[in-house]
Image: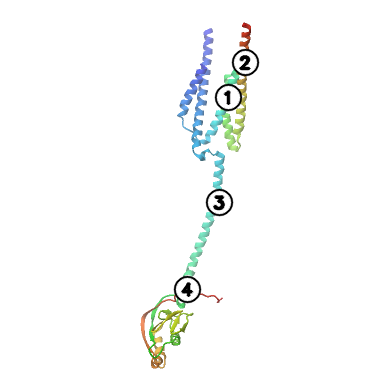
Amino acid sequence: MGEKKKFKIDKSKIMVSITIFIICFIIVYVMCIQFKTVNKIDVAEIETMRENELREALADWKEQYQDVSKELEYNKTKIAEYESKIESNEEAGELLEEELENAKMLLGLTDVKGEGVIINLSSNSELEVTSQNLLDLVNELNSAGAEAISINDQRIVAMTDIVDVGNFVVINENRIASPYTIKAIGDVTYLQSALNIKKGFLDEYQTNGYTISMKSDNNISINKYDGEMTLDYVK
Amino acid sequence: MIIGAIVLGCLIGVILGVNAPIISYTYSGYLAIAIIAALDSIFGGISATLKGNFDFKVFVSGFFGNAILSMLLTYLGDKLNVDIYLAAIVVFVNRMFLNLTIIRKYYIEKIWTEKKVKSTNKSKSE
């Protein structure tokens, strides 16, 4: 009876010991894991932030991302719109460019080539070529349908001045001197006939004693006007 | 025998715990609250033992029950966006301090009475 009682006590004591052993084991084990986890997390800065803070930051970023993606979408549609507009405008642009090129050519802002005549006019010991002679010639050429004229590589444009300054002729504010080479692009037959006509320009000048000659050329190149063209008062 | 079980349990726990893998940060909060609950149960058990009304079944069920319940509450708080684990920690730590007070008082009283007995014995022998 006594033995049995002792055994019973022993049994319960063993049970208690085992349970306490298990409890101690569990709590120490879990604490070790926790210490290790916390230690490890302290290393990286972001992981020391509390979860809530991280969540807030994440929500912030998500919102920003949504905003930005919305903006991106908006800009994309805008770009598509503009692109379609550009496509439709491209034809108009081409037309406009052509027109601009044409206008530049007319103004004398481009180098041009074409058939035409070259006139050499020079002063001699008896007679001096003045600006008036050159103006007359330019006038004659224009009336014969010349499309581009240059005198000693000075392009004659709408604003060109041909004046005498002292013993020199000034064209486009550049001093030039004899001999003068006048190039004109236009219909060769018209130009030649207009100048060669009886009592015409060449005839008259030759009889007056100027040194003048004319020849035709199929490929004359005339340089562009290289000054500046500004409009200050035209509105 | 019980002290041996405690020492053995702690030793094996440390040996295995040092080599254990770390867990995700999300779950470490649950583990922490479970540890606090378990420690509270242990202190409660010690104070009950000193008071003489220690019940082993109550101790074991409290140990596991409190840990699991506190983890469940923390989970619920996470889902409800309320920091319930703070309340659990307040309760557990409060109880830990109360139990520690009981333990402290018990030993102070014991040492005091022993001294008194000793001194009375001394005076008696004199």
Q: Quadrant of residue B70?
A: top right
Q: Is residue A24 left or right of residue B103?
A: left
Comparing A209 with A92, the one in front is A209
* Residue B9 shows in the view: yes
Q: Are marks 2 and 4 on the same chain?
A: no
Residues packed near mark 3 inside 10 Å, few (<14), some (14 to 19) or many (20 plus): few
- Rounded to the nearest angstrom, the CA distance separating label 1 from label 2 is 28 Å
The mark that comes first in sequence, 3 or 4, is 3
Task: Name the mark nearer the viewer: 1 or 2.
Answer: 2
- Rounded to the nearest angstrom, the CA distance separating label 3 from label 4 is 45 Å
Residue A9, placed above or below residue A115: above
User: Callout 2, which amino acid?
Assistant: Trp
Tell me the element at label 1: helix
Chain under disc 1: B
User: Callout 3, which amino acid?
Assistant: Asp
Which residue position holds label 2?
B112
* Residue B54 shows in the view: no
Which residue position holds label 1?
B41
